[in-house]
Image (cartoon, rainbow, N blue to C red):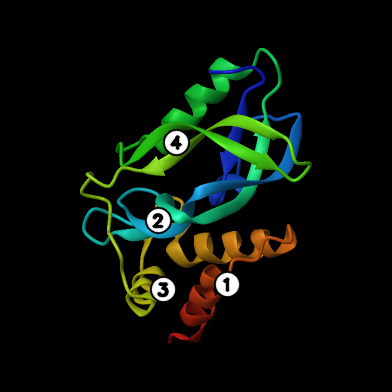
Amino acid sequence: MQTPLWIFGYGSLIWDPCFAFDDRQIATLPGWQRSFCMWSLHYRGTAEQPGLVLALDRNPEASCAGVAFRIPAGAEPETIAALRARELISYAYLEAEVTLRLASGAAVQALTYVINRDHPQYTGPMPPEEQAQIIAARGGVRGPNRDYLFATAAHLTQLGLADPAIDALAARVRALP
């Protein structure tokens, strides 16, 4: 891993990082899209009633805007350990080194987590209405699935990174009884 260590957040890491950082910048990752394509069996659902969480899913025609966090020198091992404990709980994510474009125009190498399409927690494409029904009804050890969606949508908007698909999904979930 290169120094300095950068971490790319595209979902809950944006609003709930599990590590210290000394810089935070808006960044874009080409070739990937933010997608509710992963079953959550722990944090936002259960094995019996899985929820849905975000993952980066490869799409050569897409790009994902998020946040790049620079990790303080010397904190790399503990940061990677905390991320692995959180993100690799079931190995539905793969740890990946990617090239981000920072808002400043600079390119940096970063660590992020992408969906493992061969893992049983990968949902594949799912209609938004089905996603909404699942997200509205499920929850896990970190709380209701809807709270995860709403927090992500709100923080993306606050950062000027509103995601129309996430906003539309949040509106659908809010409209459900």
Left or right side of 175 for 131: left
Residue behind mark 1: 164
Residue behind mark 2: 44
Taking the spot 54% from the left edge, 54% from the top edge, the residue there is 63
Left or right side of 41 for 113: right
Q: Nearer the viewer, residue 62 or 69?
A: 62
Residue behind mark 4: 86
Sequence-wise, the earlier of marks 3 and 1 is 3
Residue type highlighted by circle 3: Ala
Q: What's the distance in space between the residues labelled 1 and 4, CA to CA?
A: 27 Å
Secondary structure beneath label 1: helix
Sequence-wise, the earlier of marks 2 and 1 is 2
**Image x and y of residue 116, in percent:** 30, 43
Taking the spot 76% from the left edge, 29% from the top edge, the residue there is 22
Residue behind mark 3: 136
Sequence-wise, the earlier of marks 3 and 2 is 2
- Asked if residue 36 is positioned above or below residue 135 in the image, the reply reads above
Q: Nearer the viewer, residue 148 or 114?
A: 114
Quadrant the C terminus occupies:
bottom left
Decide: few, some or many residues near mark 3? Use Cα within 10 Å; few <14, some 14-19, many ≥20: many
Taking the spot 43% from the left edge, 62% from the top edge, the residue there is 145
Taking the spot 73% from the left edge, 57% from the top edge, the residue there is 159
Secondary structure beneath label 2: loop
**Image x and y of residue 102, in percent:** 71, 41
Residue type highlighted by circle 1: Pro
Secondary structure beneath label 3: helix
Residue type highlighted by circle 2: Arg
